[in-house]
Amino acid sequence: MKQLSRLLVVGLLVLGFNNVQAQDEDNPWLIGFGINAIDVYPTNDASASYPTGTLFSEFFNVNDHWNVVPSISYVHASRYIGDNFTFGVRGSLNRITKLGDVRVDNISHYAVDGVIKYNILKSTKIEPYIEAGGGYTWVDEIGAGTVNAAVGATWWFSENVGFNTQFGYKHAFEDYGVRHFQHLFGLNIRFGGTDTDGDGIYDKDDACPEVPGLEVFNGCPDSDGDGIEDREDRCPNEAGPKEFNGCPDSDGDGIPDIDDKCPDVPGLAEFNGCPDTDGDGVADPDDECPDVAGPAENNGCPWPDRDGDGVPDKDDLCPDVAGTQANQGCPEITEGVRKSLNEYAKTILFDTGKSSIKEQSADVLNNIIEILNEYAYARFNIEGHTDSVGSAKLNQSLSEERAGAVRNYLIENGVASDRLESRGFGEDRPIASNNTREGRRTNRRVEINLIQE
């Protein structure tokens, strides 16, 4: 029987180390071990063969009544089952040499107990508790069932290790059983809370169980120390304010660096944080002329304007001669120039009744060509007119032929054909009376007029 009892205690040790589960929410394991003291004196049993007394009359009579072996004599294992309750098992052994005031010869004592413990206070430095349960006790190889009750407290001097003190009473069911006090003094070790990342926050409470973090962020890290946990930090490795979701704004332009195409130079939101130095609507990185305003279609550079007339060359019909915007960059043809042109045109001489130009008109025509070349952008209409002598049909035909003859002469002498048109009006547009010789001479004329675009 003694060997069997010892095997049971060893089995309890194995059970304690291998099958204990949750002790509390944070540490799911607890084992305890230490010494136990057996006090069999105050039993209130008048039929006992050893001295009797009141239940607690000599509770503190340690030297006379307590039986203690100088080694680890109990092992306890338990698991947390919720609402401050734990369930556990305990194995203990002792040698009885003091049966009250009676000295005996090393009677063996073995016990196996199942207990339910209730922690009165929780998560405090000192945790008092009450305990109840039952078990089986062998005294000198005579076994009896017992019902047990105890009070105790654990002083946790670290998160996982505490000193345990317990005072309990074990009442034997059988008459031959020994009713006695059993007191425990030892260490409790609670452990088993999984902390994968080793940050001191158990996985069940750790929102980032794989990465070491901070308690304030439920176990998640704040790598850059800006007060924003990495999960909510757009820039977890660079410190930045909360208003930018943890990203810095190096240039102070109100645009976080992560969204800023020019993080080292203050810029505008519309250009993703880049400046527009010349204010032309083209961001400096895309502006080939960042210090001079220019249109986006020319990459931020002003269009060339060779003649400096304010009309860019691409729109300037006279890019090498200053003109006006109204005249598409070409100089305006003044009324005086127009008058001179027509004064010359009126002196062109034709053979009588024909459209052939007389040779003496060459100088006049050359003067006309010089004027036309000076205004090389302009287009002109050459108009032929006659007097009223002869039939209107012949006069119309003659006016058209003479206007065409002048046009052909000008083209043959270097004036672009697309700049010239010709038209005859016959006798329809007189500028003097056809009743006089002078009037008819005046009406026989050629006019060169600017075509207005």
Image (cartoon, grey):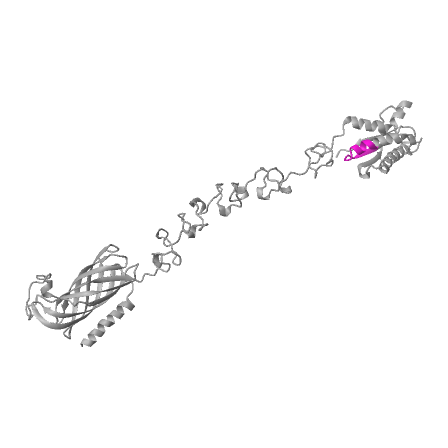
Residue 188 occupies quadrant: bottom left
Residue 219 location, x and y as percent? 37, 54
Query: Observer-nearest residue: 101 or 50?
Result: 101
In the image, the segment drawn in magenta is 369-382
**Residue with the most extreme front position:** 70
Residue 322 location, x and y as percent? 72, 32
Instruction: Please name the residue shown 55% across and 40% down the image.
Output: 275
Residue 84 occupies quadrant: bottom left
Residue 139 vertical placement versus 374 (above, below)? below
Residue 296 location, x and y as percent? 62, 41
Q: Say whether residue 419 is left or right of residue 398.
A: left
Q: Is residue 198 at all visible to an observer of this figure?
A: yes
Q: Is residue 283 at all visible to an observer of this figure?
A: no
Q: Say whether residue 380 is left or right of residue 110.
A: right
Q: Which quadrant is the C terminus positioned in?
A: top right
Query: Observer-nearest residue: 221 or 424?
Result: 221
Residue 158 occupies quadrant: bottom left
Query: Observer-nearest residue: 398 or 348?
Result: 348
Number of numbered discs visible in the structure rendering: 0
Residue 55 vertical placement versus 323 (above, below)? below
Q: Inspect the magenta stretch and tell me whether residue 184 lies in it.
A: no
Q: Say whether residue 309 is left or right of residue 273.
A: right
Q: Inspect the magenta stretch and tell me whether residue 373 lies in it.
A: yes
Q: Which quadrant is the N terminus positioned in?
A: bottom left
**Residue with the most extreme right position:** 352
Instruction: Please name the residue shown 20% across and 76% down the image.
Output: 3
Q: Say whether residue 350 is left or right of residue 1.
A: right
Residue 140 vertical placement versus 366 (above, below)? below
Residue 148 location, x and y as percent? 17, 65
